Amino acid sequence: MKLATTLALLGAAGLSSAHYTFPALIANGNTTEDWQYVRMTANHYSHGPVTDVTSNDIRCWTDSSVDHTAETYSVAAGSKVGFTVNPDISHPGPLQFYMAKVPDGKTAANFEGAGQVWFKIFGQGPTINSTGLTWPSEEKKEVFVTLPESLPSGEYLLRVEHIALHGAGSKGGAQFYIACSQLKVTGGGNGNPSPKVALPGAYKATDPGILINIYYPTPTNYTLPGPAVWSG
Ligand SMILES: *[C@@H]1O[C@H](CO)[C@@H](O)[C@H](O)[C@H]1NC(C)=O
Ligand SMILES: *[C@@H]1O[C@H](CO)[C@@H](O)[C@H](O)[C@H]1NC(C)=O
Ligand SMILES: *[C@@H]1O[C@H](CO)[C@@H](O)[C@H](O)[C@H]1NC(C)=O
Ligand SMILES: [Cu+2]
């Protein structure tokens, strides 16, 4: 019994070391405290993934089990922001960033991100050659995106997403690692972010970029899941 428990714990530790979280916002050149401007995700301890794209967890992975009192960070439109990765992106797959503008009557601190409010500002697939797929985000300890200059000023949620595809050859095998930061964008423009999608809603388990064997036969193309990127 004791041995079995020890082995189970070792097994869990081994698994979690292959997973990752995005705990800290990087903005204005500063790395902030873990979970200070990023909503604590339900995997903050396990580091495990979301695998059900129809679950509310696919949005920001905050639920009643976690502290939901992150602060809101002011950044200028057009500036570079990012997230730390704990410990690093240890699986192959695409990196994407989405944003949702906080509606009137809400703040970034209390907006849940429900409805058709999410637009994509960055999507990074693989480079592909005859030997296979290479994912630029793999092994990264920090990931970054530049906020569009024409993004209207106001409060937003910024959602980072890395989809691990090493087991994605069977349905439900893709692993979603996600987090949402709370931002107040200043000095923005009058762009009209589009298209907007709901999360959950934007993805199906059978999307070609979600249900895919990335190893064999070697894919000749890759289609990022979700809407087109709004580039501002
Ligand atoms: C953030 O970075 C700027 C320079 O990039 C620096 O002036 C400022 O003191 C930093 N703030 C904190 C809280 O570290
Ligand atoms: C394919 O791409 C990988 C990663 O960039 C590189 O190491 C490898 O040499 C490339 N193979 C060919 C045949 O170009
Ligand atoms: C993309 O890859 C799939 C499967 O490998 C293939 O059937 C399809 O023709 C490819 N599409 C393009 C545009 O190359
Ligand atoms: Cu993992």
Image (spheres, grey):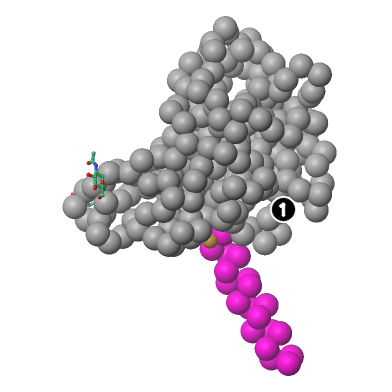
User: 128 left or right of 96?
Assistant: left
Magenta region includes residue 12: yes
Residue 160 on image: x %, y %: 57, 39
Prevailing SS of the magenta stretch: helix
Q: Quadrant of the N terminus?
A: bottom right
Residue 172: x and y in percent read 50, 58
Residue type at mark 1: give it. Answer: Ala
- Residue identifier under label 1: 42
Q: Report the magenta residues as a range.
A: 1-19
Could you tell me if residue 19 is visible in this image? yes
Q: Quadrant of residue 79?
A: top right
In the displayed structure, would residue 228 be above or below residue 149?
below
Residue drawn at point x = 76 percent, y = 48 percent? 63
Say above or below: 62 vs 182.
below
Most foreground residue, 86 or 154: 154
Q: Picture coordinates of residue 138 (x, y %)?
A: 43, 50
Q: In this view, does 1 lie above or below 175?
A: below
